[in-house]
Image (tube, coloured by chain):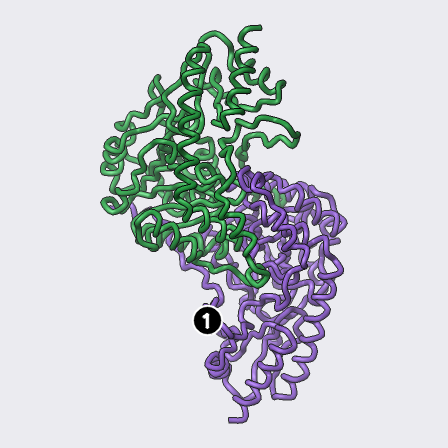
Chain colours: A green, B purple
Amino acid sequence: MSWTENVRRVVPYTPGEQPKEQNIIKLNTNENPYPPSPAVRVAIREVTEEGMRRYPDPSADVLVSAIAEEYGVEKEEVFVGVGSDDVLAMAFLTFFNSEKPVLFPDITYSFYDVWADLYRIPYECMPLKDDFTIDPEDYKKENGGVILPNPNAPTGVCMGTDAIESIIKSNPDSVVIIDEAYVDFGAVSVLPLIRKYDNLLVVQTMSKSRSLAGMRIGFAFGDAKLIKYLNDVKFSFNSYTMNQTALAAGVAAVKDRAYFDTCCKKIIATREWVKAELKDLGFAFPDAKSNFIFATHLEYPAKKLFDELKSRKIYVRYFNKPRIDNYIRITIGTDAQMRAFLNAVTEILDK
Amino acid sequence: MSWTENVRRVVPYTPGEQPKEQNIIKLNTNENPYPPSPAVRVAIREVTEEGMRRYPDPSADVLVSAIAEEYGVEKEEVFVGVGSDDVLAMAFLTFFNSEKPVLFPDITYSFYDVWADLYRIPYECMPLKDDFTIDPEDYKKENGGVILPNPNAPTGVCMGTDAIESIIKSNPDSVVIIDEAYVDFGAVSVLPLIRKYDNLLVVQTMSKSRSLAGMRIGFAFGDAKLIKYLNDVKFSFNSYTMNQTALAAGVAAVKDRAYFDTCCKKIIATREWVKAELKDLGFAFPDAKSNFIFATHLEYPAKKLFDELKSRKIYVRYFNKPRIDNYIRITIGTDAQMRAFLNAVTEILDK
């Protein structure tokens, strides 16, 4: 034998392309087209050499406190990590340890099955309905955990709070994770439910609505006992995950509520305008409440459209997967970027 | 039952105290007393808002390339993570998947058994000899992996390259991890051996010798195939672990070799001077090649000394563990800090 026999073999997640060329319109990884709050840059510049030299506070207290204050919860109800991916990876490791399958939709964030495979957790994918909505009843059978994004990715479709609550309520023996990466663009958070159900973890991120994908800051809310379990595992994995600049950036971003509100509103307005334009161009799409639209053209094949756009230096996302292989996912950029995108699409369709 | 039955229960690692009070002399967590290279601050200030807004390069190419160039290896032989703890946590998850026990010393970095417990990996602690040296023969029996720090922590004791090579050579069926967190303060790295043995992973960090504990940057070297396996698992866990400022800081730090050399030399000189002083004060200690000294006083109890120092706002580290409960671990600070420490010790012993 050889050491390679003891290696954990996995099929790694493939992130969206990060093209290195300049002058492209990048609508493929759901980044925010606007810069982060100006306070972020100031905060990062103020990180001292003393701060860099010393270990960060393992409890990330400044950031946890700022988030708790902004969201009106206790510090003990907040968890932070290196992007919501880190938060979710820790949550899978902490909470999904049953022999029963973890449940999530067949069309969803493509990292869920990767984490399940990584940790050898059994899972079962529940098919979305034909209109891409989730049937809450699918998540009321025996399971080892439930994870649902709201809005869902890459569809952008929302579930109502009542439907989500019915799922949480039906699963007292499992942790239910609601992944709210895109919630700030018009959906409703189930955060208030953490006081009612101790099996609920609500995960959010600063990557999208706070324009900080490059700083890797995710966070989560839950009952204090649940968060304690999560922190125990996190401290057993890496005591100091948040570096000094991430702590400073996160605090500055979360405190600038006015900037955050303005930014989200701009993206929502652009999204609604793009929806109207896409409809006129012959596209169909579920009613996205995210910073992206998941659209299919009634005549023009999605893969071809994706390639044509790419050749014009406009990047959107295409998933070569069953049921969604005739869709493209379009991140909402600035008005100017979306104008250029719509012009390109018009040109391609007219050819 | 309840959801809590599926929770992964762990006893989390307890990091060294990070006191919030000012005007203390902090010799308890092996931080570097000198600031990072001035180039680091410049590099962080130059991170653009565009950089913060967008996802970082998942391959961390700028940092991997800078490390590869500085250390004379190929990019494919380099792995990076959020401090060496992240690198080690990923390595445990990737390589230690046998039913046989992973081997490490009984007195060593106290995170090894925490990771083993976290991942439910069997392990066996091999006792150090009475002089705190490692017997290489202990690591030549059947095992599921080997991890050894060199220099060892908290003892500071080094093992020779020949002894380490004999362990690697005897274990073709296991991955052998050499944790070189403290290697830059006078020990010899086994990095050249990665070209000879594909089962060797050499782990280092920028937290100590490059004064960047607050930025969380660890790295590792190994055969390209071994690094590929590690990256597959890392990409399945979190695609983007290194934020933009960590990438910028790491590149700047690794490129400033002159500053790094000067800084390490200063700490080594201070350490050797402190050793002589400690000897005169009646301490015994193994010959540390790290940025700390692990010392026991021939008459004065370690715990009492630790408490007395703490009351004088001088923090060292005390481990209440078998075999080492009469030792204190003293991080090497500036000459002025060590003068204050030695004066305090003299005063305490004279009382």
Image position, residue B322 (x, y; %): 48, 74
Residue A155 located left or right of residue A168: right
Label 1 chain ID: B
Secondary structure beneath label 1: loop
- Residue type indicated by callout 1: Glu
User: Which residue lies at the image location 66% right of the left edge and 62% below the top edge?
Assistant: B209
Q: Is residue A72 above or below residue A266?
A: below
Image quarter of the C terminus of chain A: top right
Residue beneath disc 1:
B21
Residue A226 located left or right of residue B238: left
Q: Quadrant of residue B267?
A: bottom right
Image position, residue B131 (x, y; %): 62, 76
Seen from the viewer's position, the closer of residues B269 and A75 is A75
Image position, residue A247 (x, y; %): 48, 53
**Camera sees residue A184:** yes
Dot 1: within a 10 Å radius of its alpha carbon, few (fewer than 14), some, or many (20 or more) residues? few
User: Which residue lies at the image location 68% right of the left edge and 55% below the top edge?
Assistant: B39
User: Which residue lies at the image location 41% right of the left edge and 36% below the top edge?
Assistant: A262
